[in-house]
Image: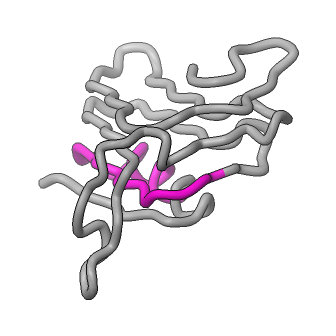
């Protein structure tokens, strides 16, 4: 069974990443068009020890009655931001874990870190 999330706030995005890291399923996180800026040390994090795939994709729009009903193929429309204050997206699998991680149709910007990568790690 696969899990699909539809998110439209920074909190929903982080909650979906946290759930996906431990639910034992292949996951797709559909991010609605907009700008998302997290406020922790790293804007958004995903750390797992599972062997499941994760796809995060931007460009989703709600229809009249359905969330994430259709897709706009323009990565500039969905932005993950570090607000010039923190790294943007940290994704990690523990030693011995496997699973494809796909990030598509997103712009990652405004990352900042004195010691690590500021964008996607």
The residue drawn where x is 44% and y is 14% is 95
Q: Residue furthest bottom?
A: 65
Q: Residue at x 71, y 22 (%)?
A: 118
Q: Is residue 16 left or right of residue 70?
A: right
Q: Residue at x 73, y 29 (%)?
A: 111
Extreme residue in the left direction: 1
Which image quadrant for residue 30? bottom left
> The N terminus appears in which quarter of the rendering?
bottom left
Q: Residue at x 82, y 12 (%)?
A: 115
**Relative to 79, does residue 52 appear above or below in the rendering?**
above
Location of residue 27 in the rendering, given as x and y in whole percent from the top left corner: 28, 47
Q: Which residues are magenta?
A: 15-36
Q: Is residue 3 left or right of residue 45?
A: left
Task: Give whichever of 97, 32 is nearer the camera.
Answer: 32
Q: Is residue 24 magenta?
A: yes
Front-most of residues 88 and 53: 88
Residue 19 at what x, y percent from top left?
Answer: 43, 55
| Residue 63 picture location, percent across and down | 27, 77
- Position of residue 28 relative to residue 69, above or below, is above
Residue 111 is a magenta residue: no
How many numbered marks are there? 0
């Amino acid at each position: 069974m696969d899990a699909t999330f539809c998110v439209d706030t920074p909190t929903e995005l982080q909650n979906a990443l946290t759930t996906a890291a431990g639910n034992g399923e292949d996951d797709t996180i559909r991010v609605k068009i907009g700008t998302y800026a997290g406020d922790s040390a790293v804007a958004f994090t995903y750390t797992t020890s599972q062997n499941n795939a994760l796809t995060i994709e931007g460009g989703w729009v709600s229809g009249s009655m359905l969330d994430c009903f259709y897709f706009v193929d323009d990565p500039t429309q969905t932005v993950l931001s570090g607000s010039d204050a923190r790294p943007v997206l940290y994704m990690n699998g523990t030693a011995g874990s496997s699973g494809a991680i796909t990030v598509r149709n997103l712009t990652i910007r405004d990352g900042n870190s004195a010691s690590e990568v500021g964008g996607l790690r």
